[in-house]
Image: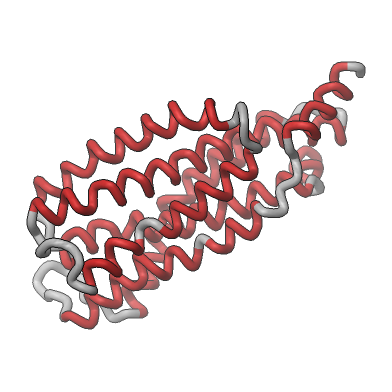
Amino acid sequence: TSQIYIALKNKSFLIFFFGYLFIAVSWGLNSSLQLYMNTYFWEFKSIMIASFLGIYALSTFTAFLLVPRLVLYIEKRSILLIAIAFAALIPPIPIILYLNDLLPDSGSWDLFYALAPFIYLGNTCLSSSAIVRESMLGDISDEVELDSKLGQQGLMYASSSLIGKLNTGLGILVAGLALEFIGFPQGSEILPNADQIFSLAMVQGPFVAILMIIPFGIFSFYSIDRQKHKKILDQLAVR
């Protein structure tokens, strides 16, 4: 209990915890509604939906290659804020384009290929934000150790793991509430009407983007930069 209290007294840890929590809610909602979007809005066949897995894998791999190089030149906070901003702004773009008849017909491979770059870029940004957050957690644990004279790495990473597990549960909960709010029919026997499908797209696209403003605002207060972390490490070294 005392270790939890020590962590909760640290401003950087609170910023991380609540910022990550709201990302989990926002992107959990997006992920939970993705199958509904692919089925009813984009009208993709099963083979097309399965083909997106390759794009997700490639974008995650790209993030793993990209982020370690970026942190050598750019502050982690800046990388995270840019990644959150693009992860929020990119997904609604194809929805808006499609509604204005600027994309190929629904259910076609041409539409799949048109969406692929947006899926790739959006997920690359999201994966990059996750990698940077985990890196920031190490810096935060050093700051907490300096303030409390106790190592808190285990607690830090346990909290991150907890939020990661909450991601799925929170996403399903919020998605269920959203579907209930827009009156989206449940069960395969009842098909949604055009208004319900449009409302689904507005929730999964623009509404999720608006929700991402919250973690963007929270993480903008994060203050551990490269110079401050070096000072923390220097002070820990002379103990």
Question: To which quarter of the image does residue 156 belong?
Answer: top right
Q: Is residue 27 above or below residue 205?
A: above
Nearest to the observer: residue 1 or residue 184: 184
Spot occupied by residue 63 in the image (x, y as percentages of width and height): 43, 34
| Image mark count | 0
Residue farthest to the right, as pictured: 239
Q: Residue at x 11, y 53 (%)?
A: 110
Q: With 239 as the anchor, is 56 left or right in this view?
A: left
Spot occupied by residue 13 in the image (x, y as percentages of width and height): 71, 45
Q: Residue at x 42, y 70 (%)?
A: 207
Nearest to the observer: residue 134 or residue 114: 114
Nearest to the observer: residue 25 or residue 37: 37
Q: With 35 as the anchor, is 18 left or right in this view?
A: right
Spot occupied by residue 108 in the image (x, y as percentages of width and height): 8, 56
Please state, as top left, top right, bottom left or bottom right, where the C terminus lies in the image: top right
Q: Residue at x 50, y 47 (%)?
A: 83
Please state, as top left, top right, bottom left or bottom right, where the N terminus lies in the image: top right
Spot occupied by residue 178 in the image (x, y as percentages of width and height): 37, 72
Nearest to the observer: residue 163 or residue 217: 217
Picture colour scheme: secondary structure
Q: Residue at x 44, y 26 (%)?
A: 65
